Image: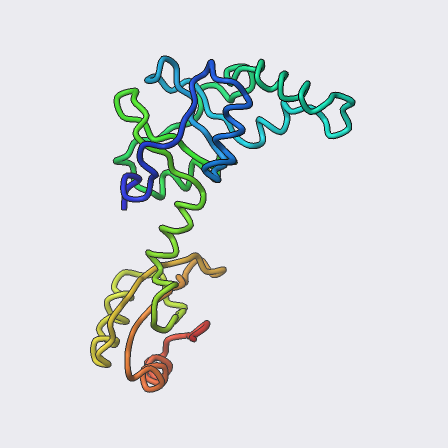
Amino acid sequence: MNVAKRMMRNPVHVDENDSMKKAMDLLREHEIRHLPVLKDGEKLVGILSERDIKQASPSPATALEIREIYYLLDKVKVKQIMTRRPYTISSTAPIEEAALILREKKIGCLPVVEEGRLVGIITETDILDAFIESMGVSGPGYRVELALPNRPGMLYEVLKLLKDFDVNIVSVATAAHEDPEMKILILRIETKNYKVLKSALKKAGYEMLSAD
């Protein structure tokens, strides 16, 4: 799965010379947390988040009247408070690359850029939705977690056994085991023979860490 399949296309954005108040209104109106910032309607020059706006906003303890606050917010330009040179990603990049950047850089979104042009935005929520879908969490079926020797051919052996029980595999994933010579296999499956299958897996010598 690549970024293009999960990104929001034609995202709401602001110009670097727009006011802070306009940015606040857009965030509130569209119920979003990030705004790409463009220059001359084309070039991506920054990203503006709710956090940036909160840091630039007057303190709740201010003695200013509301009309004075609105006046000031209308005078502050987006380019004065935005994060410049934001991290970006291509629409053809794998979604796990986007997840890795978000995690390592501790950011909440990535503008998606093609040939210098903004084509979308992908957020933490989009990444989580993709993970949920790929793991088949929201659909029917059973989750089986097995500890297997970390050697070639083990996945094939398990899948061959599942085939004998007319199992439909919804998703397959692996995770690290505390023993480096072992690997954790996580399956989501659909079958009418679940109880019998669990017994067969145990009888075949597979360590079942969890099953539901």
Which quadrant of the figure has residue 20? top right
Q: Quadrant of residue 69?
A: top right
Q: Residue at x 68, y 18 (%)?
A: 68
Does residue 91 sit above or below 197 in this rendering?
Answer: above
Q: Residue at x 28, y 39 (%)?
A: 4
State the residue at coordinates (45%, 21%): 46
Look at the picture and state if 109 lies above or below 178: above
From the top left corner, tell me how far across and down residue 108 is, in percent: 48, 37
Residues 21 and 142: in front is 21
Check the image and report above or below for 186 versus 48: below
Query: Where is residue 32 drawn, in percent x and y?
Result: 47, 38
Camera-nearest residue between 90 and 149: 90
The residue positioned 40% from the left and 46% from the top of the image is 127
| Quarter in which the C terminus is drawn | bottom left
Would you say 30 lies left or right of 151 here? right
Residue 187 locus on image (x, y percent): 34, 67
In this rendering, would 152 be left or right of 107? left
Name, please, the residue furthest toward the front.
67
Closer to the camera, 84 or 32?
32
